[in-house]
Amino acid sequence: MAAAPANYADFHRRSIDERDAFWAEQAQLIEWQQAPQQICNYDKPPFAKWFVGGTTNLCHNAVDRHLAARAQQNALVAISTETDTERAYTFAELHAEVQRMAAVLQSLGVKQGDRVLIYMPMIAEAAFAMLACVRIGAIHSVVFGGFASSSLASRIEDAEPTVIVSADAGSRGGKGVPYKPLLDEAIDLSAHKPAAVLLVDRGLAPAAMRAGRDHDWAALREQHMDAQVPCVWLESTHPSYTLYTSGTTGKPKGVQRDTGGYTVALAASMKHIFDAQAGQTYFATSDIGWVVGHSYIIYGPLLAGMTTIMYEGLPVRPDAGIWWSIVEKYQVTHMFSAPTAVRVLKKQDPEYLSKYNIKSLKALWLAGEPLDEPTATWISGALNVPIIDNYWQTETGWPILTLCNGVQQQSPRFGSPGKAVYGYNVKLIDEATGQELTTPNQKGVVAIEGPLPPGCLQTVWRDDERFVSTYWNSIPGRQVYSTFDWGIRDADGYYFILGRTDDVINVAGHRLGTREIEECIAGHPNIAEVAVVGVADQLKGQVAMAFAVPRDASGLVDDAARLKFEGEVMKQVDSQLGAVARPARVIFVNLLPKTRSGKLLRRALQAVAERRDTGDLTTMEDPVALQQIKDLMG
Ligand code: AMP
């Protein structure tokens, strides 16, 4: 392979101007059963097909490939401070477990192309299930364990899984969080019924098993201890997984990822972005239910032959030193987290940061939400390692903006996630005219010129039309991929993200569609209308705040009655969407601020909630609405 040029600007330029040659080189980072015949097929924009004609397998590259050189090295260490357990698996052991899981899934009827929905806490079996799926060409769809029955049901209906893999319970702060009743309810709600449920019984909560449908993992595993399930060589374009993400409508989108492109993109990112070596240890504190969990708890580190750490628990339990004790014990070299988690740690005794020897750590990568300067400065001083902000989305699967230290060391700029990553032809676009903004420091929509690089979404699951209309048609006069984020770029090519252009909010690094929460609250029999907006929050970045108009307000005579009703509405969100989506407050109002054409003035609502100036309100129908909210907010 040609040596990487040491100059990042050249490296990036080449990835765009000599796209196929560049990615042909990156493709050599993984093993193919059959080499690709065409690097990128962009005959039908915006649908890009990467490494056409090539056959490979994600599990082969993540697990089997390493058996020759590192069978006895730890591949996966699953640490739970919830159950006080640590389970380490070498590559050889992981290989055996994944084959057992693959055999069990096959025994339950899973075939290539079938979907397997994974609704699990952060336990090793979740990783086995993901790897087992891609091993046999089944398409996994992991649903975050914090989602409740109706969110889960809509995902079951869309994915139509043959099998659902789940567990009796998760655990949070030492308290069991039963999953099985939520799953049963979701399956009852869903029009699609899976043929089987495979349940990992952790002994945390009673789980009623439905005869004929539900199967116990431990019992089936026993029957397949010596299973040998070879990797299926899959077309590069074969879907590896779908992962649901929120958008502006209430219906979540299934982001669909391919096999070859994703494997190459992650392998290349481990080299160029993370400067990672086989044998090192990677600790991403995310959850397998999110994209970071897919790319940098499971696949990326394993593809690179690293040990990956899976952590179930809070960052402050048993105390705020827990993460750093893990870094010391496992000699973690690479750590990946979110600004919210750092803000939580910042409120704890700083002593915890100096209690452990964390010399092994090379850098801390942070993503998922804007990294504010005080947080960045605090953590970089406390850890004394580089803090590397990186910006991306569920859709892209790997960073769009960051500093690629594996190519060339570059200094970070606080407040900026860095420069355009190789492969991404990032543009700033004037929202109204569709013109590209080339002068430094102009605000525009962050967009990506097609084709999207390998690893990004191929389409929206079973909805090509939605893929095009959602992402590629929002800018007038040109077909570019919109991130729906505002940004600016300085004269040196560093980008700064200024927030979303749509109604999506970001709570503690989790993306939530305000529409989804609104639909849930509007389902309450005594709510006539509701608006949910994201409001700035010191700890979580943003929180959801709901403004609801009751159908019958006669009972809301005092604060106690209002609080009781607020609790009821929050409970409804908890039970249908999950506590992640619960608004911080539900404020009852007589009227919502709207334009004369009936459009909700979300920005004005948000401004009032953040105690900012509301700006131009000449289009507002009835100023009384906003005045009442101002009064209520105090
Ligand atoms: P998700 O798909 O849930 O990862 O959410 C992606 C969105 O999170 C982006 O479109 C941004 O709005 C936001 N985001 C992610 N990373 C960053 C970052 N480093 N800085 C600012 N915003 C970010």
Image (spheres, helix red, strand yellow):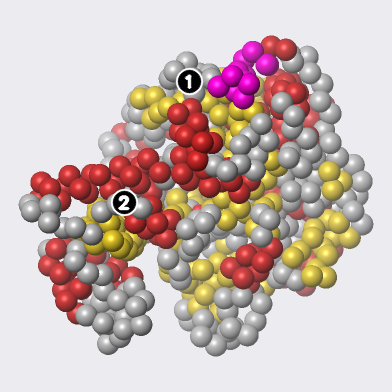
Q: Which mark is residue 558?
A: none
Q: Is residue 5 magenta?
A: no
Task: Out of 569 and 193, give the one closest to the viewer.
Answer: 193
Relative vertical location of residue 365 with respect to residue 409 in this rendering, above or below: above
Q: Which residue is mark 1?
A: 207
Relative vertical location of residue 153 with respect to residue 218 in this rendering, above or below: below
Residue 264 showing in the rendered view = no
Query: What residue occupies the far left of the structure in this picture?
Result: 558
Q: Quadrant of residue 22?
A: bottom right
Asked whether, in this view, residue 217 is left or right of residue 317, the answer is right
Q: Position of residue 201 (x, y in %)?
A: 53, 18
Q: Quadrant of residue 299?
A: top right
Q: Position of residue 296 (x, y in %)?
A: 60, 43
Measuring 31% from the left and 34% from the top, which residue is drawn there? 351
Badge 1 amino acid: Ala
Mark sitting earlier along the chain (2/1) = 1
Q: Which residue is mark 2?
A: 524
User: Which segment is the magenta one?
Assistant: 210-221
Q: Say few, some or many: other residues with alpha carbon within 10 Å of mark 1 (under 14 / 14 to 19 / 20 or more).
A: some
Residue 187 showing in the rendered view = yes
Badge 2 amino acid: His
Measuring 30% from the left and 63% from the top, which residue is drawn there? 529
